[in-house]
Amino acid sequence: MEHAKEGFSRAAKKLWNELVVCDSLPVLEASEGGCMFRHILAAMAVTFSAPTLAQNTAPSSPAPSGLNQKLINVPGTSWNVYGPNQSTKRLETDGPKGYPAIRATIARRGTNAWDSGATSLVPKPVAAGDAILVAVYLRAPELKDGETLEISLVGATGATAPYPAIAGEKAMLTNQWKVFFASGKAPQAFAANGVQATVHLAGAKQVVDLGPVQVYDFGQGFDLSRLPRN
């Protein structure tokens, strides 16, 4: 476990170094190799790295481009899995880099992909028109190397009926942890605890591991093309 954390800390330090270069650029690139993508990964790396990294290597000035200030959820594995024909198990150290994860086992395909799923509540309010980004670690542990599993929706919705859509993308999972993104603009104002990150799980009989999730609010007038994509 200590070895895993040490390796993760080195990776996070490397990402912080890349941020120094990124912050000097006038425009954030939309490609996977662009600055925003590295900003998001760096923020997740620092959040979920060993405590000594956050204390000793994070800059004393504002977080990269104020990214942490745009977080509107409590980063972590706070998933609620709902619906029929599902069971869950908490994996204390089997998540990304040894952190907790939730294993959701779907015993039977649902009539709709959203009949069973996972949600994570966002405690802060969201204004109409705000640009929202969801970043979540996912994997399908029972797949063989080279196989993929499609999740029909990873994203964010309102937390109560009729669950207005905010952001949603498909995700192609493998048996390895990967960060998946979804972005969109809030169609209306949402009060505190009125938004949730969501993953639809009833599209097939399957096993999906849900890792840490982070939700960002980039405010009004933000160009979604600047945000990372899957």
Image (cartoon, rainbow, N blue to C red):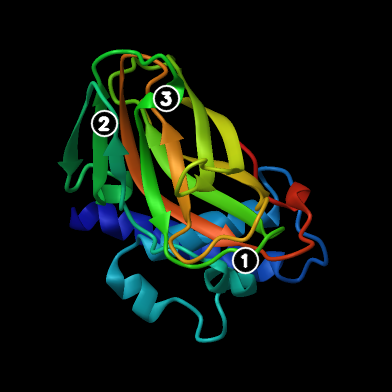
Q: Residue furthest bottom?
A: 60
Q: Which mark is residue 104?
A: 2
Residue at 52% of width from left, 54% of height from top? 41
Q: Nearer the viewer, mark 1 or mark 2?
A: 2
Q: On the image, numbered disc 1 is attached to which residue? A: 19
Whether residue 91 is situated above or below residue 52 in the rendered picture: above
Is residue 91 toward the left or the right of residue 96 in the image? Answer: left
What is the x, y in percent for residue 141? Answer: 29, 26
Q: Which is more N-terminal, label 2 or label 3?
A: 2
Residue at 37% of width from left, 14% of height from top? 204
Residue at 44% of width from left, 22% of height from top? 113
What SS does tag 3 mark? loop
Q: Residues within 10 Å of mark 1 (few under 14, many from 20)?
A: some
User: In 3D space, how far apart are the residues under numbered discs 3 and 2 (Cα atoms)?
Assistant: 15 Å
Q: Give the amino acid type for the residue marked by disc 2 in the picture.
A: Ala
What SS does tag 1 mark? helix
Q: Quadrant of residue 174?
A: top left
Q: Which is more N-terminal, label 2 or label 1?
A: 1
Q: On the image, numbered disc 3 is attached to which residue? A: 174
Q: In this rendering, does residue 6 appear at all? A: yes
Q: Residues within 10 Å of mark 2 (few under 14, many from 20)?
A: many
